[in-house]
C-alpha cells in the first residue's frame, strides 16, 4: 500500500535529519501546526523567559530539553515560522549531542506529545505541496544530497534553484496560449473561424520541438554527470585489469590473481578528481574460446559495458603483445575507435617486467599508447590526465540539462505529441485532433514540474528520499 495515499499535511512530523549513529551533534526536525506547542512542552531557554511559541522566526536559542522527571540534554533550538521555512509550515530544529540515546529519547517524547515519525522525503513533499518547490526542484534536492562531484553538485543546485523548471514552464505557457486559441476555435466551429494563425502555429510548435529535442539529447550528458563517466577496463585475461582498477582507486577493490579468468563479472567503483566523477568498470578477460559457462557470461557482459562506456581502456601486456595483435586491435575495436563520442585508450602494462624495448615499440608510440606498471602504480597519473582531457562536463553554465530519467521520459512523450500536432497541421486535419495532441503535450510537460501528478508518482519520487529530508 502506498503510504502517501493516506497522507495528511495537518499532522506534525518529526525525524532525525542527520545520519544515524554517534557524532558530535545531531539535528532533529519538527514540522507542522504542532511544532511550536509540542517543543514548548520540553524546551526552556537559558536566556529569556519567552516560550518557543513567542520566539521570532529564524532565531536560535540555547536551553534545556527535559520532561517533568528527566533532563535529557542541553540543546540549541532554531525556529522557522511559516511560510518562510523549508516546508512552508512552522519548523523547529533541535541540535542536541550526538548520543544515540539522546536522539531516540527526544524523538520518543515528541511522538508521545502528538507528533509522528516522518515518512521518507516528507519534509520536501510538504515543501512541494506548499508550493515552495515544484516537483523537478524537489527531485533536485535529492540529487544535491547525493552529489559526489563538483559538476553533479552544480547541476543539482542549478535545477534546485529553478533553472530547468523555468524553461519547462515557459514552453508550457506558450502551449497553453496555443491550446486556448484552438479551444476557442472549437467553441465557434459552426462559424468556421480561425483564431490561431496556422503559419505562426507551425512556427511555434517547431520551435518548441527544437528546444525539447535539445533537452532530450542532453540526457546522456546529464546521466554521465549524475552517475559518473563510465570507463571500461578491458583486455585479455591476466593482463592486469584488476590491478589497474585498484591502482586507479588507490585501494584493494578487486581480487588480483595470476590465474587467468579470475574476474567473472564486472566490478564497478567511482573516483572523483578535479570535480569530475569517473565510474571505472573492471571487466572479465576477453578471449576467443572458453568452456566455462560463467566466464562466457562475464565476457558477454564485458561487451555490453563496452557499448555503454564513454571511454575504454584497452590493457595489454607489453612484454608479450605482437605486431599482429596490434593490427587485430585496430580491426576488432574499429567501431569503438571510429565513434567520435567514445574515447579509446591503449594501455601497455607490466613495464616493470620489460628488460629491453620490444621491437614493435614504434607502432605502440604511433597509437599513442600509455605505458604503465599497474603493480608499481607507475604512470597511473598519465591515464587520469588523458581521461580528464576527454571529459566535457566541466562547465555547465546556464545550460538546461536533463539528468532525471522521469523527466527524460516525459520530454520524449511531449515530443511525440508535438510531432503528431505538427504532422496534423501539415495535413490540414481537423482542429479538434490537433488540440488533443497539444493537450497531451501539456499533460506530459506538467508531469515534470508537478502541475499534473498522482499519489503514485509522489510516492515513487519521495519514497526514495532519506527520512528527515
Image (spheres, rainbow, N blue to C red):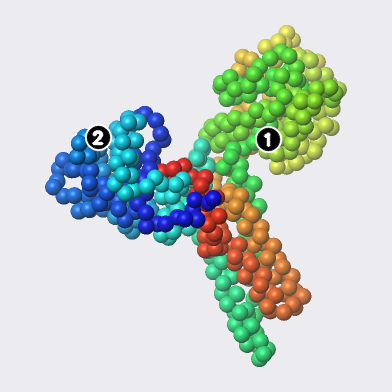
Horizontal side of residue 335 vs 269, given as left or right: right
Q: Quadrant of residue 311?
A: top right
Alpha-carbon distance for marks 2 and 1? Answer: 55 Å
State which quarter of the image contains the C terminus. top left
Image height of 215 relative to 117, above or below: below
**Observer-nearest of 181 and 97:** 97
Image height of 390 relative to 430, above or below: above
**Is residue 255 something that shows in the picture?**
yes
Residue at position x 30%, y 33% in the image: 102
Residue at position x 75%, y 41% in the image: 339
Say few, some or many: other residues with alpha carbon within 10 Å of mark 1 (under 14 / 14 to 19 / 20 or more).
Answer: many
- Earlier sequence position, callout 2 versus callout 1: 2
Residue 218: assigned label: none
**Observer-nearest of 240 and 339:** 240
* Image location (x, y in percent) of residue 60: 24, 45
**Observer-nearest of 469 and 416:** 469
- The residue wearing badge 2 is 72
- The residue wearing badge 1 is 311
Residue at position x 59%, y 65% in the image: 443
Outermost residue toward the bottom?
A: 191
Q: Nearer the viewer, mark 2 or mark 1?
A: 2
Residue at position x 52%, y 45% in the image: 464
Amino acid at each position: 500500500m502506498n503510504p502517501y495515499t493516506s497522507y495528511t499535511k495537518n499532522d506534525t512530523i518529526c525525524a532525525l535529519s542527520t545520519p544515524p549513529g554517534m557524532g558530535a551533534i545531531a539535528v532533529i526536525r519538527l514540522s507542522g501546526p504542532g511544532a511550536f506547542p509540542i517543543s514548548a512542552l520540553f524546551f526552556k531557554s537559558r536566556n529569556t523567559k519567552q516560550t518557543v511559541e513567542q520566539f521570532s522566526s529564524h532565531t536560535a536559542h540555547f536551553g534545556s530539553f527535559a520532561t517533568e522527571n528527566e533532563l535529557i540534554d542541553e540543546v540549541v533550538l532554531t525556529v522557522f515560522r511559516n511560510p518562510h521555512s523549508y516546508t512552508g509550515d512552522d519548523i523547529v530544529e533541535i541540535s542536541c549531542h550526538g548520543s544515540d540515546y539522546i536522539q531516540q529519547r527526544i524523538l520518543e517524547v515528541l511522538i508521545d506529545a502528538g507528533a509522528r515519525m516522518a515518512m521518507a522525503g516528507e519534509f520536501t513533499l510538504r515543501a512541494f505541496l506548499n508550493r515552495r518547490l515544484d516537483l523537478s526542484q524537489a527531485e533536485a534536492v535529492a540529487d544535491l544530497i547525493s552529489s559526489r562531484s563538483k559538476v553533479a553538485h552544480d547541476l543539482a543546485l542549478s535545477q534546485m534553484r529553478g533553472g530547468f523548471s523555468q524553461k519547462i514552464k515557459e514552453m508550457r505557457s506558450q502551449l497553453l496560449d496555443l491550446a486556448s486559441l484552438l479551444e476557442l476555435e472549437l467553441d465557434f466551429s459552426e462559424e468556421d473561424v480561425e483564431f490561431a494563425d496556422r503559419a505562426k502555429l507551425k512556427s511555434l510548435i517547431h520551435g518548441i520541438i527544437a528546444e525539447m529535442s535539445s533537452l532530450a539529447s542532453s540526457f546522456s550528458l546529464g546521466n554521465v554527470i549524475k552517475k559518473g563517466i563510465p570507463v571500461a577496463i578491458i583486455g585479455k585475461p591476466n593482463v592486469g585489469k584488476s590491478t589497474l582498477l585498484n591502482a586507479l582507486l588507490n585501494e584493494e577493490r578487486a581480487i588480483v590473481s595470476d590465474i587467468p579468468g579470475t574476474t567473472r563479472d564486472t566490478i564497478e567503483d567511482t573516483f572523483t578528481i578535479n570535480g569530475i566523477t569517473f565510474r571505472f568498470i573492471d571487466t572479465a578477460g576477453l578471449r576467443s574460446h572458453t568452456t566455462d559457462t560463467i566466464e562466457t557470461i562475464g565476457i558477454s557482459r564485458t561487451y555490453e559495458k563496452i557499448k555503454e562506456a564513454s571511454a575504454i581502456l584497452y590493457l595489454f601486456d607489453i612484454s608479450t603483445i605482437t605486431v599482429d595483435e596490434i593490427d587485430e586491435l585496430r580491426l576488432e575495436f574499429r567501431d569503438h575507435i571510429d565513434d567520435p563520442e567514445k574515447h579509446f585508450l591503449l594501455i601497455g602494462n607490466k613495464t616493470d617486467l620489460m628488460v629491453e624495448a620490444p621491437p614493435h615499440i614504434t607502432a605502440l608510440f604511433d597509437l599513442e599508447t600509455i605505458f604503465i606498471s599497474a603493480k608499481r602504480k607507475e604512470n597511473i597519473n598519465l591515464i587520469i590526465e588523458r581521461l580528464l582531457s576527454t571529459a566535457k562536463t566541466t562547465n555547465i553554465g546556464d545550460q538546461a540539462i536533463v539528468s532525471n530519467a522521469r523527466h527524460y521520459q516525459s520530454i520524449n512523450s511531449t515530443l511525440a505529441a508535438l510531432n503528431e500536432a505538427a504532422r496534423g497541421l501539415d495535413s490540414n486535419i481537423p482542429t479538434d485532433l490537433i488540440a488533443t495532441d497539444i493537450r497531451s503535450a501539456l499533460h506530459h510537460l506538467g508531469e515534470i514540474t508537478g502541475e499534473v501528478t498522482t499519489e503514485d508518482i509522489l510516492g515513487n519520487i519521495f519514497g526514495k528520499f532519506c527520512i528527515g529530508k
